[in-house]
Image: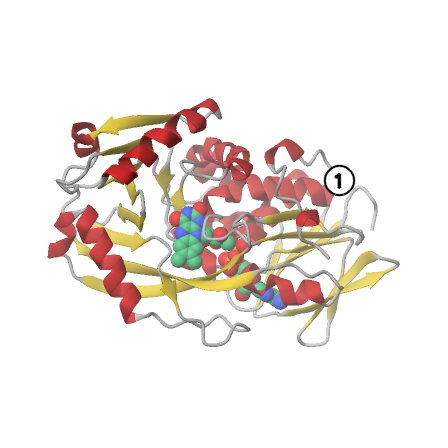
Amino acid sequence: MTPDAPSIVIVGGGLVGLSAAFHARRAEPRARVTVLERARVGDAASGASAAGVRVMGRDPAERALALESLSRWPELDRELEGKTGYRRSGGLRVALDEAGWAEARATVAEQRAAGVPLELADADGARRLAPGISLECRGGVHCVIDGQAVALATVHAFAAAARRVGVRIEEGVVATAVVLEAARVAAVTCGDGSSVACDVAIVAGGAWTAPLLAKVGVRLPLRGRGLQMLLTDAAPASLTPVVGCFGRPLSLKQLADGAYLIGGGWPARIPNEAVNRWEVLPESVSGSLEVARAVYPPLAARAVTRSWAGIEAFTPDDLPVLGPVPGVGGLLVAAGFSGHGFALVPALGDVLARLALGLDPRADLWRGLDVARYAS
Ligand SMILES: Cc1cc2nc3c(=O)[nH]c(=O)nc-3n(C[C@H](O)[C@H](O)[C@H](O)COP(=O)(O)OP(=O)(O)OC[C@H]3O[C@@H](n4cnc5c(N)ncnc54)[C@H](O)[C@@H]3O)c2cc1C
């Protein structure tokens, strides 16, 4: 293994791992890049995602990554030679009460100053952007560069592009441990007893990242949570932006086929944290529908056709942990996206690939998200 063409093993075939693999191999075609996925690509959070592509309302520590990613989404289908279903449909966060309207007005200036192109919309303006919105709507905040993609289509586009540039994706292979020699990564061992030698290991195992890192003495406070999604039957096209609401858990979009997709962080039950299994909770279904119908009354005529959940790792500050693990050469981590990692995937993959290849890691994009703030 030559220092200028490392061998890289990525644990996790979700969007973060796939994007890192694609970017690494595209930047350095001599690098050996292997993705180990214990199930099928996209089986966990990435395939279940609401696939909102948003910068509006992000924590300041995530904004640079989000803005960089949003600048790439419009060209992503061309880059990947695939179809992510991405549309720059805009995002609209509405206020249904005085407290929400005050919050809407308060957030605009600070975000605009940081480069997020937000506009305050009064009630008429919000209704023009989203006809059918509640008559109680006081107004909202509109972000013209927010949008949406399709979760599984995006997973398959990244996986196909990664394979096309020469990444080996091994599905049905569980990574059991990262092997260190002299405080450096030497290999990743697999469930069947085999191992893959490598110079760099990127652990992007979503909600199952922490146990693998704990084996090399790195303890990260990641907790898996189940997040619920609802899909309705189709209706004629009427809603363009992704709709959220101040003070109420909601993300609502109308898909290309007319069905509405409803999320917003409603919890699902996880019976066993070690595996990717969840149970939809009746109270979350009714709670989510109640909020969605209050914000967008045309939903009262729609029936729910499917419900599911995805398990996502959360951190105490709801911000991801990203980058090198201090004290362990060649070990990188990318996890804890806390329900909002989908939009960040283009820039995340680029940053991880740069770190793995020893290129300029664009530290300006992810300052404040480093592992050191948690690693013990
Ligand atoms: C319901 C829901 C809605 C969401 N909505 C949005 C949204 O609208 N906008 C947004 O920006 N974000 C959203 N997110 C968040 C976003 O989808 C996630 O942050 C992102 O998909 C995380 O990708 P990942 O690759 O880190 O994790 P995952 O997709 O969970 O992938 C991790 C993979 O690692 C594999 N793995 C784990 N351990 C091992 C091991 N030891 N060996 C081999 N493989 C292993 C798992 O099987 C899994 O496939 C949502 C998430 C959910 C669940």
Relative placement, left or right, of 306 versus 184 is: left
298 or 41, which lies in front? 298
Q: Which residue is mark 1?
A: 358
288 w.r.t. 82: above or below: below
Residue at the extreme right of the image, as rendered: 182
Identify which residue is drawn at 67% across, 48% down: 373
220 w.r.t. 362: above or below: below
118 or 238, which lies in front? 118
Specify the amino acid type for callout 1. Answer: Gly
Residue 132 in the image, given as x and y percentages of width and height: 14, 41
301 w.r.t. 244: above or below: below
Identify which residue is drawn at 14% across, 49% down: 297
Colour option used: secondary structure
Whether residue 231 is visible, yes or no, is: no
Relative placement, left or right, of 216 versus 362 is: right
Residue at the extreme top of the image, as rendered: 113
136 w.r.t. 13: above or below: above
Secondary structure state at the residue bearing disc 1: loop
177 or 40, which lies in front? 177
Specify the quadrant of the image occupied by residue 243: top left
Identify which residue is drawn at 40% across, 36% down: 56
Q: Quadrant of the C terminus?
A: bottom right
Specify the quadrant of the image occupied by residue 74: top left
Residue 356 in the image, given as x and y percentages of width and height: 71, 45
Identify which residue is drawn at 45% across, 52% down: 339
Whether residue 82 is visible, yes or no, is: yes
Residue 252 in the image, given as x and y percentages of width and height: 28, 48
Residue 178 in the image, given as x and y percentages of width and height: 74, 64
